[in-house]
Image (cartoon, rainbow, N blue to C red):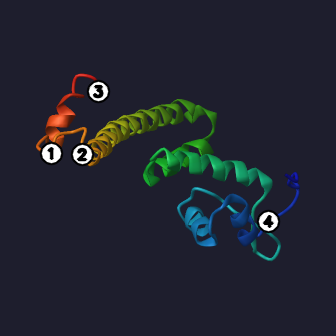
Amino acid sequence: MTALDPEKRYRIGEFGALVGLSTYTLRYYEDEGLIRARRDENDQRYYTVNDIGWIGFLLHLKGTGMKLTELKQYVKWRAQGDQTIPQRRDLLEQVREASLAEIREREASLKVLSHKIDWYDGKLDHQIADNESFAEYLSQFSDQD
């Protein structure tokens, strides 16, 4: 991979291609105050290599399920400086807990889905009786899950 020039000014389309976002999304993020493009002498927006890391972090936060209002609050606190580190940390902790709860919920759903697939396989290869319902089949796992 070629190193990016730290001095280069990337126009919105070029920057979007670098970070995997459309120009529409970058403008939306700018309108919402999540990112701030600089302007050149011709009032054209541009971004730098430093903006890549910030966008990446925002996308990680978004990927955790962080809501837009929470993202905006985080950005606002970040702009206020280090005195808001406790608030930012608490917000990230709340988002982490919500994300972990969602993961646990998905894992439980995936277990049921896997059992349903196994039940169908058992029906198809006649290892499960024709009259055994999925609920009956599933009950054998209730103590294990």
Q: Are marks 4 and 2 in contact (CB under 8 Å)?
A: no
Residue 48 shows which numbered tag? none
Q: Which mark's residue is nearer the viewer, 3 or 2?
A: 2
Q: Is residue 111 left or right of residue 137?
A: right
Q: Which residue bears the numbered disc 2?
A: 123
At label 2, the amino acid type is Lys
Q: Nearer the viewer, residue 43 or 115?
A: 115
Specify which label sits upstream in the sequence, 4 or 1. Answer: 4
How far is the residue under mark 4 from the one under mark 3?
A: 51 Å
Reading the image, the residue beneath label 3 is 145
**Residue at (59, 72) in percent of width and height:** 24
* Lower sequence index among marks 4 and 2: 4
Residue 107 drawn above or below residue 61: above
Instruction: Assess disc 3: are there few (<14), some (14-19) or many (≥20) residues with their C-alpha within 10 Å of its C-alpha.
Output: few
Can you tell which of label 4 and label 3 is closer to the viewer? Answer: 3
Give the residue pinned by disc 4: 10
Mark pair 3, 1: CA separation: 25 Å
Q: Amino acid at mark 1?
A: Asp
Q: Position of residue 71 (x, y in %)?
A: 50, 49
Label 3–label 2 contact, CB within 8 A: no
Q: Of the residues tagged 3 and 1, which is closer to the observer? A: 1
Quarter holding residue 142: top left
Residue type at mark 4: give it. Tyr
Q: Is residue 73 left or right of residue 107?
A: right
